[in-house]
Amino acid sequence: MIRVLLADDQPLIRMGLRALLGSEPDIEVVGEAADGGEAVEMAADLLPDVVMMDVRMPVLDGIEATRRIVGDPRLATVRVVILTMFELDEYVFQGLRAGASGFLVKDSDPAQLLQAVRVVAAGDALLSPGVTRRLIAEYAGRVVDAPATPELDVLTEREREVVALVAAGLSNQEIAERMVVSPATAKTHVSRAMTKLSARDRAQLVVFAFDSGLVHPCPRP
């Protein structure tokens, strides 16, 4: 059973999400928070698998609430999905940097929303390779070159190469083809890099690659 916490200051949206999610046999809505502060408290009390987090909320916005949930060692198994109005708005970048496992547009169809909950609960990032590429294109235009950090030292040369390819938006299959290895080997390299960097998912690898200087974004013309 996937346990979900809803965090949104609009009762009608929470009602709709609860009705949809609650109709599934493998999903249970364990709580509803009307603001970010409440979301942090309820996440600590209920230990949900997934928090569906709105961005604009009173008391504490969704970005800061996400940062606090992800930063709490007691909530290491809790995954956060940012709910946004637009696919590539500023909140997406802020949310990923805060530790969110992905994002979902509020007007997504029901099937997409249900799939999102299951994907994130399984430990994967809610970022398809295609969406990742678009995020990177936007991200590259917003950040400046960062100096290499000591954190890179924990990675082998092979793992650095893999992280750079993840940051380029490649799937495990595409990484395997580029490196001339099996998909299973590519997946293993990605998993080891995530473990060494304490990254929750591929979304965090993308952010790390740019922030650490492993990948240098090219300014857009």
Image: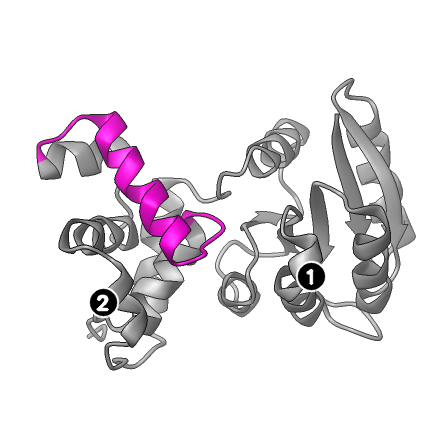
Give the label on residue 9, or none. Answer: none
Q: Residue 47: x percent and y percent?
A: 78, 46
Quadrant containing the N terminus is top right
Residue under the point 67% across and 63% down: 72
- Residue located at (33% from left, 45% from top): 192
Residue 145 point in image, percent of width and height: 25, 80
Report the quarter where the C terminus lies: bottom left
Residues 3 and 149: in front is 149
**SS at badge 1:** helix
Mark 2 Cα shell of 10 Å, populated few (<14), some (14-19), many (≥20): many
Residue 125 visible in the picture: yes
Looking at the image, tell me whether mark 2 or mark 1 is earlier in sequence order: 1
Q: Identify residue type, mark 2.
A: Leu
Q: Is residue 127 left or right of residue 1?
A: left
Q: What's the residue type where badge 1 is placed? A: Ile
**Is residue 135 in view from this perspective?**
no
Whole-angstrom CA distance, mark 2 to mark 1, is 27 Å
Residue corresponding to mark 2: 214
Tell me which colouring the rendered structure shows: one colour
Residue drawn at x 63%, y 52% as measured from the top left = 76
